[in-house]
Image: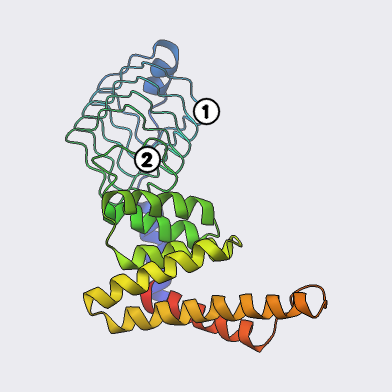
């Protein structure tokens, strides 16, 4: 029975026609850079050089525009839903009223882009250069920081956390997250400062769980620093990974799990 349903499903999938790329419109765009209202859904435009192109009201849904040069392009009202704009240059582009739901904008340049009325719901904004103020909300920046940290890009994470703190300096979890990123980069002094700031803020907010997490983080850093000092005094050379350090790593893993950091 299961095999029958699987076969039937495959037959149905094969029977459904897949919309092909409109090559005529693609060629028109590449040759003239004038393609307002064109059907470019699913078009392959990787590395396309389209500065100041007129793509107003064009359907670019699902198109691959990775590393395309769209500087100053007119994309007013364009459909860019699910489009891939990885590392694309959209500096100064007109994106007013554009549909960018689910678009992949990782590493894209959005400096000076006009985005009034544009829909960025579900778009991947990781590493966007010149993130417009309308999109650079505290929540977005914080989440981008967490994602960067998860990827191991602690410097990128810190950049996002710094922007959050500049907008709202009283969010304890951001200091704790930045402290962890600093520790990962070997900045124990900075990590300790952030952990203590987080502890103070958690205390003022009456957040016992957060305060305890910060205290554990502080204790872990101080244990490492004390062990390092003892080894220097005893002239033993490098810092080994002892019980205190392993315990600290366990506490850190607990922080990441409990607070999503």
Asked whether 210 or 257 is in front, the reply is: 210
Q: Is residue 72 visible?
A: yes
Residue 219, position as x, y percentages in the image: 51, 81
Could you tell me which residue is drawn at 71 percent across and 80 percent down?
230
Is residue 154 shown left or right of residue 89? right
| Residue 260 x/y as whole percent | 39, 71
Dot 1: within a 10 Å radius of its alpha carbon, few (fewer than 14), some, or many (20 or more) residues? some
Looking at the picture, tell me which residue is in the foreground, 136 or 75.
136
Looking at the rendered image, the quarter that the N terminus falls into is bottom left
Taking the spot 38% from the left edge, 63% from the top edge, the residue there is: 175
Judging from the image, what secondary structure is the residue with disc 2 in? loop
The kind of secondary structure element at disc 1 is loop
Residue with the mark numbered 2: 83
The answer to which quarter of the image holds residue 247 is bottom right
User: Does label 2 or label 1 sit earlier along the sequence?
Assistant: 1
> Could you tell me residue 79's position as x and y percent?
26, 35
Instruction: Give x and y (percent) for residue 81.
Output: 30, 42
Query: What is the number of the mark on residue 47?
Result: 1
Instruction: Specify whether residue 2 is in view.
Output: no
Figure check: 188 above or below 144: below
Q: Residue furthest left?
A: 117
Direction front: furthest residue: 233
Please report the residue visible at 34 percent of the width from the left and 79 percent of the height from the top. Answer: 211
Q: Quadrant of residue 110?
A: top left
The residue shown at (65%, 89%) is 243
Q: Is residue 190 above or below residue 237?
A: above
253 relative position to 132: left or right: right
Figure coloring = rainbow
Q: In the depicted view, which residue is nearer to us: 211 or 8?
A: 211
Rendered view: 121 above or below 229: above
Q: Gap in Å between the C-alphas at discs 2 and 1?
A: 14 Å
């Amino acid at each position: 029975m299961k095999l029958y349903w699987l076969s039937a499903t495959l037959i149905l999938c094969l029977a459904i026609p897949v919309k092909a790329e409109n090559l005529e419109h693609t060629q028109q765009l590449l040759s003239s850079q004038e393609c307002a209202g064109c059907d470019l859904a699913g078009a392959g435009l990787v590395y396309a050089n389209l500065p100041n192109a007129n793509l107003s009201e064009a359907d670019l849904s699902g198109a691959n525009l990775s590393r395309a040069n769209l500087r100053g392009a007119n994309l007013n009202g364009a459909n860019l839903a699910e489009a891939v704009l990885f590392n694309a240059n959209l500096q100064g582009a007109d994106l007013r009223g554009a549909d960018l739901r689910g678009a992949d904008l990782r590493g894209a340049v959005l400096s000076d882009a006009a985005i009034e009325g544009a829909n960025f719901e579900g778009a991947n904004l990781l590493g966007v250069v010149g993130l417009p103020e309308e999109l650079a909300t505290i929540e977005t920046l914080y989440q981008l920081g967490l994602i960067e940290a998860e990827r191991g890009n602690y410097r990128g994470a810190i950049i996002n956390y710094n922007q959050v703190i500049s907008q709202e300096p009283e969010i304890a979890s951001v200091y704790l997250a930045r402290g962890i990123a600093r520790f990962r980069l070997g900045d124990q002094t900075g990590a300790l400062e952030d952990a203590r700031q987080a502890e103070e803020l958690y205390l003022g907010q009456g957040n016992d769980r957060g305060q305890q997490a910060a205290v554990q983080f502080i204790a872990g850093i101080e244990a490492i620093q004390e062990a390092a000092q003892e080894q220097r005094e005893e002239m033993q050379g490098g810092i080994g990974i002892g019980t205190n350090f392993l315990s600290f790593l366990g506490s850190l893993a607990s922080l990441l799990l409990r607070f999503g950091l």
